[in-house]
Amino acid sequence: MSRQSTSPGFIVVITLLFTALTALYLLIGGAWLLSLGGSAYYVVAGVVLLGVTWLLYRRSPAALALYALVLVGTAIWALWESGPDFWALAPRSGVLVVFGVWLLLLVSWRLDAPRKLGVTSLVGALVIWAGVLVYASFNDPQTINGTLSAAATTPAANPNGIDPSDWPAYGRTQEGTRYAPLQQITPENVKNLQVAWTFRTGDLKGPDDPVEITNEVTPIKIGNLLYLCSPHQILFALDAKTGEQKWKFDPKLRPDPSFQHVTCRGVSYIDLSASAATAQPAAPASDTAPAAPAASLANGACMRRIYLPVNDGHLYALDAQTGERCAGFGNNGDLDLQHAQPVTTPGMYEPTSPPIVTNTAIIVAGAVEDNFSTREPSGVIRGFDVRTGRLLWAFDPGAQDPNRIPGAGEHYTIGSPNSWAPSAYDAKLDLIYLPMGVTTPDIWGGNRTPEQERYASGLLALHASTGKLAWFYQTAHHDLWDMDQPSQPTLADIAGKDGKTVPVVYAPAKTGNLFVLDRRTGTPVVPAPEMPVPQGAAPGDHVSPTQPFSDLTFRPKNLLTDADMWGATMYDQLVCRVMFHKLRYEGTFTPPSLQGTLVFPGNLGMFEWGGIAVDTDRQIAIANPIALPFVSRLIPRGPGNPMQPEPGAKGSGTEAGIQPQYGVPYGVTLNPFLSPLGLPCKQPAWGYISAVDLKTNEIVWKKRIGTVRDSSPIPLPFRMGMPMLGGPIVTAGGVAFIGATADNYIRAFDVNNGKELWRARLPAGGQATPMSYSIDGRQYIVIAAGGHGSFGTKLGDYVMAYALPQ
């Protein structure tokens, strides 16, 4: 049996089957693609491979020469379509090159003589492909290889008076810079980082948790203590030097599989003794919380506080030293954020991001469940007395008068646009900058009121002490794509080309646009002209004729074509091309449709909640844009898709898949654009790390980040550029750190040129933004490694700290 299975006849039969089946596949699939307006290559290749099959059947050595022609023609076509991009060339060449080697080594000598011309032709074609692939591996057309100007030698004095060794807020400062003015770790020594300590929260996914359970926390550090929350909002205080637990507080969250999120991005801190001198008491707006007993602060209890948002619509105030509830805040340290909400179903209103804290107010916003119904909680933004929790003001974005406080028996507006991502705060201007989402349902808007549109999908600036409107800048008009402002804005004072310093706010958008506004007025500092966008909304809806596009942007320069479609092989790449042509796609802001719309940049966004990191001394930014298309498809009402929910209906527990959108004429499916093998249909890269010179607003360098080690069946460390959730930080030492990628690593990059300097394997997914601090003269880098449910990374309960050897 063994001798028969390796006989020349067997080899030839296998070869004939391969060429014949491949030829038929390319002919049939290529004809389908051609009928849709796609590339003719597959039909031509299929015809020629049929000829190769016939010649092999005749044992003619001309088969080798003809196959060489296929290889050379494919090389020309592939370079014409994609340029010298290795990962774009790989699926076009892989199967054909491997089969060419098979022909050369196992089949050529079985053919009739003379064979020299055929063998020489095939060797030459394989050498050509080898040269193309080697050249492409060193000349990535997607890479920008620039170098930033010389670094600042010493970090500037911190105008906020923050100890350089601390990280006391989500973005280190409430300006959202994610910049640590620490210089111990440098490009020269970062390779020596090692694990300093590991902490495990013990908080893991339970049977009642939804798919969308995530560990996105960025810890904060004040003095000797580190504070962090786990997915179920259990709050931990750790010794910053050793990682030893000092105390914990468990709010006893009762999740449900219908919750759209179970996550905690962080907590907030204030030292009331330090803020007392500048605090200006504000008149209470209502009696939603009792006044603080005089003794509660007089004895020093709760002068230093941690504020913990919880996904069931509560906010806790805890003593930073002991973890005890602050008795004078709300109801024994518990503030009910469901007060006056029109819908109080647990999980439909979730404060997932840390609130802004001023000397007088704690300002709270929250996520509202996407795409469930038109009858959902309000996205109201509220300011509460920082000491007592008494309501000071409200801004209801969907109300005719946003500042009106509901009276007895009244409630805030149903379905007001919400602000789910972290906010930023300018203490000098007394302005808070809130990234706004769209009223839900997100993917159809024919029934939205003018009030619901007014403050949706843009950047909202409010006076922090009163909640009065300062200005609003809309980044997506009549948003039908969930193109909300997804990340914390970043504040910086930037020297312009004329030498004048301008106080700006950077607002990263899902579209890849980085809007740069004067934070005093909301006026664009970098031009963002209105440009025409595709028209033709679903029946009953409409589309804005134009949308703003910032001149500072990571968005694609050109429309996607079928040449941008990808796969592990030429077979699934062909399927992706067919799928692409069957979808509606006319560029950014192509309207949702019954046909199915390709959304690129996708619903996940080019920027997500990780935001950007800004070195305010050097005036540079580190960004990590992603590029992963999504597909949305409207589902008309009918059997199995009712207009109103059944009694007791709950959410899906995820933002992907079938979304009911009760109350409007369509449900919707939302999914990444994937091949039948589960791979992205758009060619890589799907994720980058990049640097921007903020003085010139130029992208100086851009590199792929992330490997397929944890995404492919075989754990190969191919650096293709992976999708990410999480953001970067930057240090005065000239090193940027980031986790975020779909492989389980934390990485360090040279800020000057983008060179990867170090990486460490994480025990679970690092879908969190790291932070940095120092204690006793030693600088630490800390990241939560807990994974992300719907992102598909490994779940865990780790917090990892790295430092140089002592």
Image (cartoon, grey):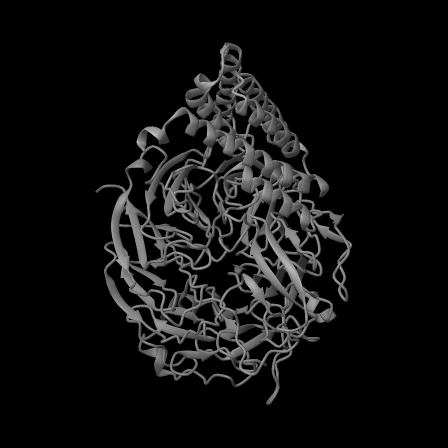
Q: Quadrant of residue 737?
A: top left
Q: Can the viewer see residue 175 in this picture?
A: yes
Q: Indicate left or right for 687 with 206 as reference.
A: right
Q: x and y percent of residue 792 in the render?
A: 43, 55
Give the residue furthest to the bottom.
Answer: 409
Rendered location of residue 81, percent (x, y): 63, 31
Between residue 353 and residue 492, name the one nearer to us: 353
The one nearer the camera, 639 or 722, is 639
User: Left or right of 84: which side holds 268?
Assistant: left
Residue 71 against residue 612 in the figure, above or below: above
Q: Residue at x 56, y 24 (%)?
A: 71
Q: Is residue 287 left or right of residue 29?
A: left
Asked if one can make out residue 553 in the rendered structure from this viewpoint, the answer is no
Where, by quadrant of the figure, is residue 35 drawn?
Answer: top right
Quarter of image, res 251: bottom left
Residue occupying image coordinates x 31% and y 78%: 299
Please provide percent x and percent y for residue 221: 35, 58
